[in-house]
Image (cartoon, coloured by chain):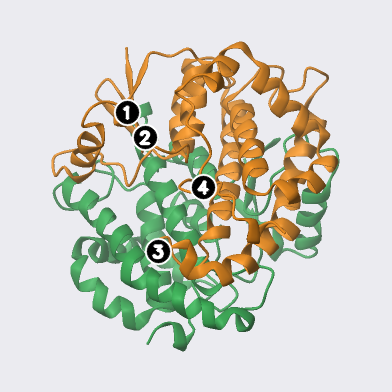
Chain colours: A orange, B green
Amino acid sequence: MRYELYYWSGIQGRGEFVRLALEEADADYVDVCREDDGEAVMMALLDSDTVARPPFAPPFLKAGKQLVGQTANILQFLGPRHGLAPADEPGRLWTHQLQLTIADLVSEVHDSHHPLASSMYYEEQRREAKKRAADLVAQRLPKFLGYFERVLVRNSRPPKFIVGRKLTYVDLSLFQVISGLRYAYPNAMSRLEKKYSELVGLHDRVQEGPRIAAYLASARRVPHSEQGIFRHYKELDP
Amino acid sequence: MRYELYYWSGIQGRGEFVRLALEEADADYVDVCREDDGEAVMMALLDSDTVARPPFAPPFLKAGKQLVGQTANILQFLGPRHGLAPADEPGRLWTHQLQLTIADLVSEVHDSHHPLASSMYYEEQRREAKKRAADLVAQRLPKFLGYFERVLVRNSRPPKFIVGRKLTYVDLSLFQVISGLRYAYPNAMSRLEKKYSELVGLHDRVQEGPRIAAYLASARRVPHSEQGIFRHYKELDP
């Protein structure tokens, strides 16, 4: 079966966490918005009055007749089908729990450049963004990254993954978090990273995996930019 | 088996979504932080070096030897065990997808009084909170509440629930959202509610259910306050 991924074509954004899982799984999928009129198709689906279980927002995945929305929920759907999550229920719940904690971090990173409103331009909230970004770097990133580092250390012997002995979608998402934070906050990360060697090591192992390496080298991987979640603004990263 | 719920005792907060499910399920549970030294027990668990799968933050649930964290994940764990979620996988994923959308709304409501940093007092970010709260009321609440109203209308005949024909944990959470928004933004809600009659009807049906009604009348239901997620500040609700 060919999956249909619905997400904005020009950015990594939240869709990238799903793309990484589909790529690692070598799944047959189409990134709908990169096709002709793809975004029109997505908007029509979002606005349709007849979809029984409508998604609130992109990303969402079409699998046969099933529509699955919410990034972490899509990963929870794909994980067991493609060997990217444990088979047992406690293992699946734990994997998903880690993904939901990543989702919380991702929302906080987004709000570091849009603390007042997503509907306003960054330039209209730069002053407030400086304060929120300072708190993100001083308080929140150490709390989140320190947590994932602890879980990694506690999990297993080398080669280390965050759940059990095999790569899961959470490892892929942690790669994306480190990649995004390095782009958005290079100065802060150069200081912080020293404390999170296991996390950095995981990032490197994921990046060097054959399928992910091929994906990152392809045109399918759009670059980081100031349209997505991980945005670089010099004044936010002194 | 007796569940142990770990969450701050003095507030509804995110733990309330779990309490409502445990109460509706008539589950055997202890709200640990309301016992003597309960919060010390919770903090020891959070700080422990030996917990293999440590939660990032409260709420979390102990079920036998299993620790389950992240509000929506706890509900996903409890749902099928207590008839508060569909048994089929597509139904469970859809129910969870709705819960994750509620979690997004809850985070935005929290940030409406803490747009700059959770680590700062409200009084230090009142000016910014006025802007974020204005956007919440003008843009975000209509988007979220309009979505849930559409899903309700699309789902079924009376008596309406949001998934299928039976009450799920999402119905309980939507009750809590309406209850909290009425407390935090009474003026805004008195205007907005008129557009969401199905959602208001669902709130009322949940509130009148025998187990939830008994819970709400008991001392176990702590009142809304300015310590939780749904906070009332006059200046944010002109």
Labelled pair 1, 2 in contact (Cβ < 8 Å): yes
User: Numbered disc 3: what chain?
Assistant: B
Image quarter of the C terminus of chain B: bottom left
- Residue kind at label 2, given as amino acid type: Ser
Looking at marks 1 and 2 on the same chain, the residue that comes earlier in the sequence is marked by 2
Look at mark 1 in the image and give the residue it sits on.
Answer: A34
The foreground one among A201 and B55 is A201
Alpha-carbon span between mark 3 and mark 2? 33 Å
Q: Tell me if mark 2 has few (under 14), some (14-19) or many (20+) residues whose alpha carbon lies within 10 angstroms of its own.
A: some
- The residue closer to the viewer here, A39 or A22, is A39
Residue under numbered circle 4: A229
* Amino acid type of the residue tagged 1 in the rendering: Arg
Q: Which mark is residue A9?
A: 2
- What SS does tag 1 mark? helix
- Residue visible at 63% across and 42% down? A183
Residue type at mark 4: give it.
Ile
Give the chain of mark 1. A
Residue shown at 71%/56% (left/top)?
A: A137
- Tally of numbered tags: 4
Q: Mark 3 — residue?
A: B177
Q: CA distance from mark 4 to mark 2?
A: 14 Å
Q: Position of residue B32 (x, y in %)?
A: 69, 57
Asked if the residue under mark 2 is in contact with the one under mark 4, i.e. CB atoms within 8 Å, the reply is no
**Please, which residue is most extreme toward the front here?**
A234
Query: Horizontal and vertical percent for residue A81?
Result: 46, 16
- Whether callout 1 and callout 4 share a subunit is answered yes
Q: Are marks 4 and 3 in contact (CB under 8 Å)?
A: no
Q: Can you say which quadrant of the picture contains the N terminus of chain B?
A: top right
Q: CA distance from mark 1 to mark 2?
A: 6 Å
